[in-house]
Image (tube, grey):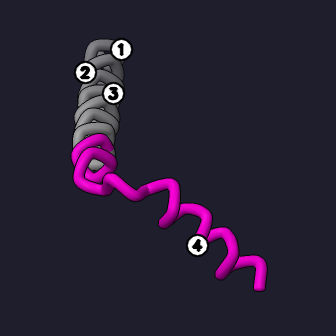
Amino acid sequence: MPSHGLLSTLEQHLQRIIGHLNTMHTISSMAWRQRPHHGIWLSKRLRDTKG
């Protein structure tokens, strides 16, 4: 059945996307916790991009 093949392909894509998002979220939250001065870093970064 072509519809079953399409469904499984979509499911594989969704699982890959969800896994990727979960990984990115975990990495970003870990990096956020390891950066206690993220407010200072962010303001410095914004100043650098403006000037």
Q: Is residue 5 left or right of residue 39?
A: left
Q: What crowding class fits label 4: few (fewer than 14 Cα within 10 Å), some (14-19), or many (20 or more)?
A: few
Image disc number at residue 11: none
For the residue labelled by badge 3, is the local secondary structure a helix, a strand or a loop? Answer: helix
- The reply to whether dot 2 and dot 1 touch (C-beta < 8 Å) is no
Distance from the alpha carbon under mark 1 to that under mark 4: 52 Å
Quickly name the residue at label 2: 8
> Residue at point 69% right, 75% down?
47
Residue lying at the far right of the rendered structure: 50
The span shown in magenta is 29-51
State yes or no: residue 32 in magenta: yes
Distance from the alpha carbon under mark 3 to that under mark 4: 37 Å
Residue 33 on image: x %, y %: 26, 45
Quickly name the residue at label 1: 3
- The reply to whether dot 4 and dot 2 touch (C-beta < 8 Å) is no
Amino acid at circle 2: Ser
The vertical placement of 1 against 40, above or below, is: above
Amino acid at circle 1: Ser
Image disc number at residue 14: 3
Q: Which of label 3 and label 4 is nearer to you?
A: 4
Q: What crowding class fits label 3: few (fewer than 14 Cα within 10 Å), some (14-19), or many (20 or more)?
A: few
Q: Which of label 1 and label 4 is nearer to you?
A: 4
Q: Quadrant of residue 24?
A: top left
Quickly name the residue at label 4: 44
Q: Is residue 14 visible?
A: yes
For the residue labelled by badge 4, is the local secondary structure a helix, a strand or a loop? Answer: helix
Q: Which of label 2 and label 1 is nearer to you?
A: 2
